[in-house]
Image (spheres, coloured by chain):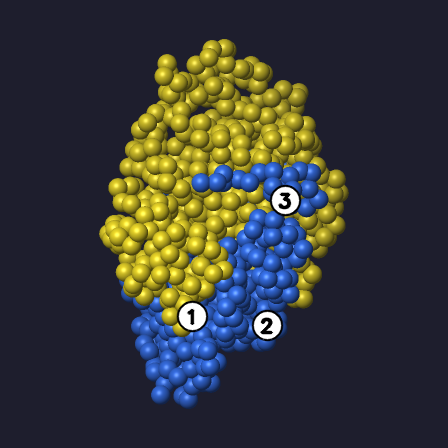
Chain colours: A yellow, B blue
Amino acid sequence: MTEPVRGGAAPTNGVLPAALPPTARATTALLTDKYELTMLQAALANGTAHRHCVFEVFTRRLPAGRRYGVLAGTGRVLESLPHFRFEDADLAFLEETGVVDARTIDFLSGYRFTGSILGYAEGETFFAGSPVLQVEGTFAEAVLLETLILSILNFDSAVASAASRMTSAAVGRPCLEMGARRTHEQAAVAAARAAVVGGFAGTSNLEAGYRYGLETIGTAAHAFTLLHDDELGAFKAQVAALGTGTTLLVDTYDVRQGVINAIEAAGTGLGAIRLDSGDLGGLAVEVRHQLDELGATGTKITVTSDLDEHAIAALAAVPVDSYGVGTSLVTGSGAPTCGMVYKLVARADSTGVLQPVAKASPGKPSQGGRKSAARRLGHDGRAVEEVLVTGDDEAVARWSPDSDDLRPLLVPLVMDGAVDSRWVGPHGVENAVRAHQASRSELPRGARRLSAGDPAIPTVSLTLP
Amino acid sequence: MTEPVRGGAAPTNGVLPAALPPTARATTALLTDKYELTMLQAALANGTAHRHCVFEVFTRRLPAGRRYGVLAGTGRVLESLPHFRFEDADLAFLEETGVVDARTIDFLSGYRFTGSILGYAEGETFFAGSPVLQVEGTFAEAVLLETLILSILNFDSAVASAASRMTSAAVGRPCLEMGARRTHEQAAVAAARAAVVGGFAGTSNLEAGYRYGLETIGTAAHAFTLLHDDELGAFKAQVAALGTGTTLLVDTYDVRQGVINAIEAAGTGLGAIRLDSGDLGGLAVEVRHQLDELGATGTKITVTSDLDEHAIAALAAVPVDSYGVGTSLVTGSGAPTCGMVYKLVARADSTGVLQPVAKASPGKPSQGGRKSAARRLGHDGRAVEEVLVTGDDEAVARWSPDSDDLRPLLVPLVMDGAVDSRWVGPHGVENAVRAHQASRSELPRGARRLSAGDPAIPTVSLTLP
């Protein structure tokens, strides 16, 4: 084997002093597996690179026991797409390290995605086989996007899917995202965004506030109390700086004394106290009683220690006002990735006619051919089936529901290379929040059960003639 | 509650057409939880912000059953540190959204970390309580780094810890990182780097090759075969473009026919075939036999389907030449975050004397006071104990081992704000690779067992007078 690190031959981007952080890159194009480019090289050589193709993103199965998944990240895919271009430094790297040949580098230098992308609206619920994204273009332009699209959708959807379960369990009480420290620093920003798509009310992450206009929250950690000579002094300092509406963290030493100190420092108008350790349920009952006795009947209680959807559900009958969730949220609550794949489902033959294709690998089922999708609704407006529409390619591409009980799921995201701006930036997040609320409300009530079980609705095929 | 998305009030960074991708930010300073800044505001107001402090990063426990952890990400922390500064756009965001007051914004505008950081060498093994990073400076400058440091170390160490188990299980056969599509697109780059620290031989991730000089690998996916009219045509195209040394993926349709086609296309000098589905152990035996019969005795076999350390171990007796690992690697093989925390362990009192501090929260043990650390070695050079040195602050700060059987673990990383360049860039990765190899070799042989058990060595305290 060669050495794992080329060392001296490497670009100096990572070596200090650099003008910008290593992540501050003008392009997203190298966030890609090498094999996308070597495939391109081989396909350019024999002309198949220009065959018209349809790729679909779907998951083969939901995480064990999950009732539904929540699509998130579509807006981030669209934000990344215009920057998927190979600039001089990228091309020089590919050339110097021999990744691909000169013809391929020449092709990459002019690369822009000029195809079209349909997909489920961000925030929509999905099931095994749901074609959540459909990328159409030449093989050359579509194959290169595989890794970036999957990275984004697999991570963001894992977080949004967990978030949705948590906000269901919270039954209207606000959930606040605080997991930045438990995942990669840039993943943290995406996680905050995905959490909001899944119904969270805000995030501790400032960069997520900056990039996506998310509501940011947070007041103080144990370090602030420990910094001071005593807890009362710390609380007085916090209230002086942040006002009586602040949240005081009362469990650094003794919770009962902490609550006394909190009210002494802020008065009975204190905004909230936070509990971050111990038996949160029992403590919250005691603290509520204590606060009420002290006259702080409007002071809220927020809890934040290792919560997941099950812990939240267990606190439903306890006088808690909001939940701060970290680790389990940003790691997908046991399912840190969605298992979405990016599969070629149709490509032109030598005469230019699109043909369905599918591999036959054991244990990795996939169905050839372009799909459309709709959700069938019952008389009460609740979803009853996920309908995957298959059959003749042109018929599927043209298909739209002919009856009111079918809600079509594919919406245009990119047309001939042009990104639909409805889905990007803060506005895109707002749309995704609404889409998720509507989609979850439409599912059968059993969909919100946290216990392991079958998908909320079955998936059926509708084959067009 | 307020709305989770401020929408119109948000900066336009995320709205197309933007000149740069949303991640292309000149600073790392907003990759931070809001409460770091509100604590700063309160501490600036009463003067405690300038108290001298020592923060330590450690984990309270290893993931259940793990024998050791592997520290990774230190180099990335150091690469991010010089960019932890608040520029005009960041300050405007903080002001417009009312995160902190004018005095705090004024302080942040001049923020530079001027303190010092010690830590375990990147790649070093660690245990519960090991002070893997120690940040010393004023409260103001040290508290702000909490989130960014934890994000990086928690994610990167989770991946490196999983990687180390996989490379142990592979017993010398190369392991190749292919997980980019299963985690956030920037986390993928860090994961590739951490995998190499943990002993991986290369990565599919081009950006990781670009940033850190890592060896990149990969040839073709099923899509390439499906793009062509038949498998033989696809293989011939790949060999024509990439040479006979390439790796052909033989399981798109039928593995036995795939191997026949592969040798027909490339001849018996074919570099390797790849298996990505089915019963890898049984298939590898059959394929090895088939290749040998065809005369392709030098053609290697690489396997890549849902591997983790246990699957790799189960293939030890099977004629496989290398392992490609994705999902389980980048998600930490069941432990997607390390649970590291950033705790204030000592701070100056009003007279300027450093005092140990620790919270008393139930279930979250931490020990006050600055620590030093060393690994005690037995006569055979194998590690026998993790030694945490505590006691009088000045004595601990000055401490160095007085006997050869103690290997000191803390090394200087940042002195008075200046980053030690040994630990950054491609060179930093090389040093981390070596540090991990040495540290793992030094652990008792039982450390490599994959089964759940106690930490490889106990952790003991040495209290200085």
* Nearest to the observer: residue B16 or residue B445: B16
CA–CA distance between discs 1 and 2? 22 Å
Subunit of mark 3? B
Subunit of mark 1? A
Q: Residues within 10 Å of mark 2 (few under 14, many from 20)?
A: some
Name the residue that disc number 1 marks. Answer: A228
Q: Residue B11: give its label.
A: 3
Mark 2: amino acid: Thr
Quarter of the image for the N terminus of chain A: give it: bottom right
Name the residue that disc number 2 marks. Answer: B114
The answer to whether any part of residue A110 appears in the image is yes
Coordinates of residue B278 in the picture (x, y in percent): 40, 39
Mark 3: amino acid: Pro
CA–CA distance between discs 2 and 3? 30 Å
CA–CA distance between discs 1 and 3? 36 Å
Q: Who's the residue at 52% across and 59% down the image?
A: B37
Q: Who's the residue at 31% across and 34% down the image?
A: A449
The mark closer to the camera, 2 or 3, is: 3
Subunit of mark 2? B
Disc 2 on helix, strand or loop? Answer: loop
- Going by the image, does B190 lie left or right of A379? right
Q: Is residue B458 above or below residue A138?
A: below
Q: Is residue B5 above or below residue B28?
A: above
